[in-house]
Image (cartoon, rainbow, N blue to C red):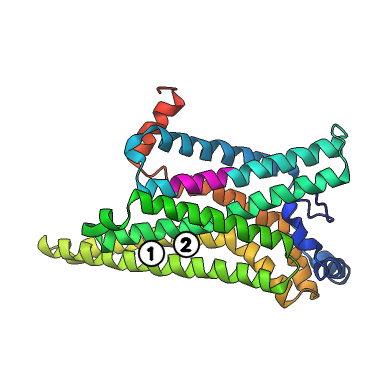
């Protein structure tokens, strides 16, 4: 598998670029103990992957079981869960192969391992890109449901949602393949960073606008009941906390990975950047953690989904 020092994940190919290999050694030599490297064991990777795998599989099974959840919104949520499942599954497969190789229980030719490495890289990268797209699609769907409530069902139809899903999947596979093939090109890394920033700005603008509209609505209701200040302030605070958690988790889990890509472009030979590169495994672990958190934010808040989940867990098909 792709093993580059402490960077033992398949996407560690990002750390094996011609510009990245020397600065890792330079950073270690010049900074010494000042480098903070968080060690992520294969056991932890495997545990996170299994938890995410089971959790997202339950979300997919639950939505598939209940026909009332076969709507555009849950279509996007189901796709997000499926992609998180693929990210987790590829992580579990990769970690299992690494552990078997280290234990001597698996013997494979280098060419075979390289092909497996490339396949899992494409699956992981396409899933990550698609996940970002579906997070944005969920935000757009919620925005339309609030600001165009009367026209929502004519704007966001199931056929249109399916076409959007197909387009996202195809585009993600194509771009992730190009990314794996040309990962050592600066333009490719910059495109990925710009894409992440675009998704972050899109989600922030839409959710902030939705929060403002919700506060206005709550204020109008409060005026009718002559309780303007307590209700409006309480609702606004609750909404602000929810928005902070949603965007904060997104930025915390995805930001370090794209910071890593940015630093490869901006300061590939700087010792401080070299220290950050050494925590690449941590950044990938945060993305897997996001795959665990996504169902809690976007799926399990639904009472009907939770009720169907209980039926799935008790095998009441």
In reply to whether residue 218 is colored magenta, the answer given is no
- The image position of residue 60, as x and y in percent, is 47, 38
Q: Nearer the viewer, residue 237 or 189?
A: 189
- The image position of residue 218, as x and y in percent, is 22, 62
For the point 50% across and 45% down, the residue is 81
Q: Nearer the viewer, residue 12 or 158?
A: 158
Position of residue 50 relative to residue 80, above or below, is: above
Residue annotated with mark 1: 207
- The image position of residue 269, as x and y in percent, is 81, 75
The C terminus: image quadrant: top left
Residue bounds of the magenta highlight: 77-85
Residue 180 left/right relative to 72: right
Q: Is residue 234 visible?
A: no
Q: Tell me how far mark 1 sits from mark 2, CA to CA.
A: 9 Å
N-terminal of the two: label 1 or label 2? 1
In reply to whether residue 79 is colored magenta, the answer given is yes
Position of residue 119 relative to residue 189, above or below, is: above
For the point 72% across and 55% down, the residue is 11
Residue 152 left/right relative to 133: left
Q: Residues within 10 Å of mark 1 (few under 14, many from 20)?
A: many
Position of residue 202 relative to residue 6, above or below, is: below
Q: Are marks 1 and 2 in contact (CB under 8 Å)?
A: yes
Secondary structure category for the residue under label 1: helix
Q: Quadrant of residue 18?
A: bottom right
Secondary structure category for the residue under label 2: helix
Q: Is residue 50 visible?
A: yes
Residue annotated with mark 2: 247
For the point 76% across and 67% down, the residue is 184
For the point 40% across and 61% down, the residue is 243
């Amino acid at each position: 598998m792709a093993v580059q020092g402490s960077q033992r994940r398949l996407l560690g190919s990002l750390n094996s670029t011609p510009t990245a290999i020397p600065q890792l050694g330079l950073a270690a030599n010049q900074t010494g103990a000042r480098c903070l490297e968080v060690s992520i064991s294969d056991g932890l990777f495997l545990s996170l992957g299994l938890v995410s795998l089971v959790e997202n599989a339950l979300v997919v099974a639950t939505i598939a079981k209940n026909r009332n959840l076969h709507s555009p919104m849950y279509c996007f949520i189901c796709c997000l869960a499926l992609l998180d499942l693929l990210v987790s599954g590829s992580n579990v497969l990769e970690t299992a192969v690494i552990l078997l190789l280290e234990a001597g229980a698996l013997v494979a030719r280098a060419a075979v391992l390289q092909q497996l490495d490339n396949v899992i890289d494409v699956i992981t990268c396409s899933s990550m890109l698609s996940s970002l797209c579906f997070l944005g699609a969920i935000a757009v769907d919620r925005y339309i449901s609030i600001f165009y409530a009367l026209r929502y069902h004519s704007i966001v139809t199931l056929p249109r949602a399916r076409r959007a899903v197909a387009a996202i999947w195809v585009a993600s596979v194509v771009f992730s393949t190009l990314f794996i093939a040309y990962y050592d090109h600066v333009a490719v890394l910059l495109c990925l960073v710009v894409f992440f920033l675009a998704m972050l700005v899109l989600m922030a603008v839409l959710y902030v606008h939705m929060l403002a509209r919700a506060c206005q609505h709550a204020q109008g209701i409060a005026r009718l009941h002559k309780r303007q200040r307590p209700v409006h302030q309480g609702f606004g605070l609750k909404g602000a906390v929810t928005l902070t958690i949603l965007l904060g988790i997104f930025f915390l889990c995805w930001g370090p990975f794209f910071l890593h890509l940015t630093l490869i472009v901006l300061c590939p030979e700087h010792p401080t950047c070299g220290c950050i590169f050494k925590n690449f495994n941590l950044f990938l672990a945060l993305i897997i953690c996001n795959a665990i958190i996504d169902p809690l934010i976007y799926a399990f808040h639904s009472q009907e989904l939770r009720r169907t989940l209980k039926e799935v867990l008790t095998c009441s098909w």
